[in-house]
Amino acid sequence: MTDEETHVVTAFARHDGHVLLCRRSEHVGTYTGRWGAISGYAEGDPDEQVLVELHEEAGFETDAVDLVRAGSTVDVRDDDLDTHWVVHPYLFDVDDRDVAVSEEHEACEWVHATEMLRRDCVPGLWAAYERVAPSVRSITADDEHGAAALSVRALEILRDRAGVLRAEGASPEAATDEVADLARRLCRARPSMAVLENRVNRAMATADADAASLETAAMDGINRAVRVDVDAAERAAALVGDRTVLTLSRSGTVLRALQEANPTAVFVAESRPGNEGVGVAERLLADAPTTLHTDAAVGHVLATEDVDCVLVGADAVLADGRVVNKTGTRLAAVAAAHEEVPFFVACATDKVRTDDTVNLESGRRSAVYDGSAPLDVTNPTFDVTPAHLVDAVVTERGELDQSDVREVADELASLATWDDDADREADDDGDAAEGADNDDASAANRR
């Protein structure tokens, strides 16, 4: 077997929880007829070459793909070809599923990632995917994506582990125990994000006690999550119509709603800490005249501009109707009430908490103050908006009032009964290990 290394890039394109697989045609020199991701020889810098391959093989433009993660390389030795492949794996989120297939592929399909475990794929494909796949650690450290997006990532993690256990022929008991433990850790990963826990609970509650059923339940959960998030966005878009809107933070539901509506203009608060509003404003610029402003200017904008409504997302809607969302939401709601501007929250019903517990996360101290004085510093990432300041919670089921929210909370609470016999505190060893992972991830994110 040769020790000479042949470097290749492999790009997994992901959209709404599915990845793109392509079957190699007779126009390629190796692995004809086998399934793979977007790949090519790494001629020069792999980070640059992977973008070339995405464009040449699938037609993805650079501005339509977002790099999620570049993983460590995978060594694949093929004795038949006397080749030592060094695979550079990448994961990209793409804007849509439109693919312009090159002659290097005879077919392309958007599938759940675990389909790789059941198809005739190029060597090392699953190993490469695992290097860039979502994990509990990546969900804990993620401060760029909204709760709905992270809930889909959580379901992908459940799906992937159940799929591996299914492929390995794990016993029903072993598979159920392992996936249940993973589900509990996911539910603890982001306690402020009710949608993550609710969607994990739904998958576990609807699955039978075996790996195949657990995988299917997670896949169904992904498909359902995408559908209801879209439905909620469409209802919010109809509500906004052609009005002038103010928003803040980054909500996938709100972003989709504003892109589908025809707003006269959009005002976007920068959304510190994190400044997610900057990216939102850039995305919306193609859809409507967009103005970016400081968080402190929200009251000023509502008082001096002809804003028709405020539309925000939610990380959670408490059972009593209060809304947990990015810091600044409460201030915007108070200012909107003073100016008699309607204040709407757009989200799927899965974001309703089953209780009135508030879990607020905090940002870095240095984002507020990096000096040496012994100051106390607070940098909350989320705040709580009283229910009486919210004119409507717009969901896939329509506009909900406080009594409707309570009914949804009771419905979602029933899904958590899959874990009635388990200790929700988890064992000390598991928590210590996960805590270490999370601390490492948070530290890396702070750096």
Image: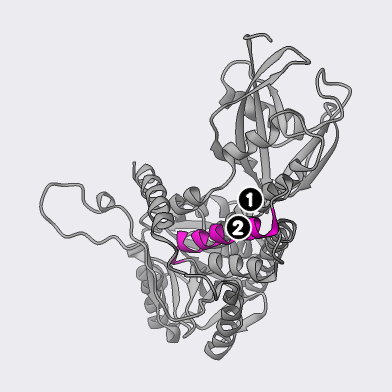
10 Å neighbourhood of mark 2: few (<14), some, or many (≥20)? Answer: many
Q: Quadrant of the N terminus?
A: top right
Q: Is residue 412 above or below residue 209?
A: below
- Is 184 contained in the magenta span? yes
Tell me where residue 34 appears, x and y as whole percent: 83, 31
Q: CA distance from mark 1 to mark 2?
A: 7 Å
Location of mark 1 (residue): 161
In this view of the protein, which residue sits in the foreground, 385 or 335?
385
Rendered residue at 46%/51% (across/down): 142
Pointer 1 with pointer 2, Cβ within 8 A: yes
Most prominent secondary structure in the magenta stretch?
helix
- Is 112 contained in the magenta span? no
What is the three-letter code of the residue carrying label 2?
Val
Rendered residue at 76%/45% (across/down): 115
Q: Is residue 202 above or below residue 273?
A: below
Location of mark 2 (residue): 179
Tell me where residue 26 appears, x and y as whole percent: 89, 23
Q: Secondary structure at mark 1?
A: helix
Residue 411: which quarter of the image?
Answer: bottom right
Tell me where residue 216 appears, x and y as whole percent: 74, 59
10 Å neighbourhood of mark 1: few (<14), some, or many (≥20)? Answer: many
Rendered residue at 21%/59% (across/down): 377
Q: Is residue 83 above or below residue 135?
A: above
Q: Secondary structure at mark 2?
A: helix
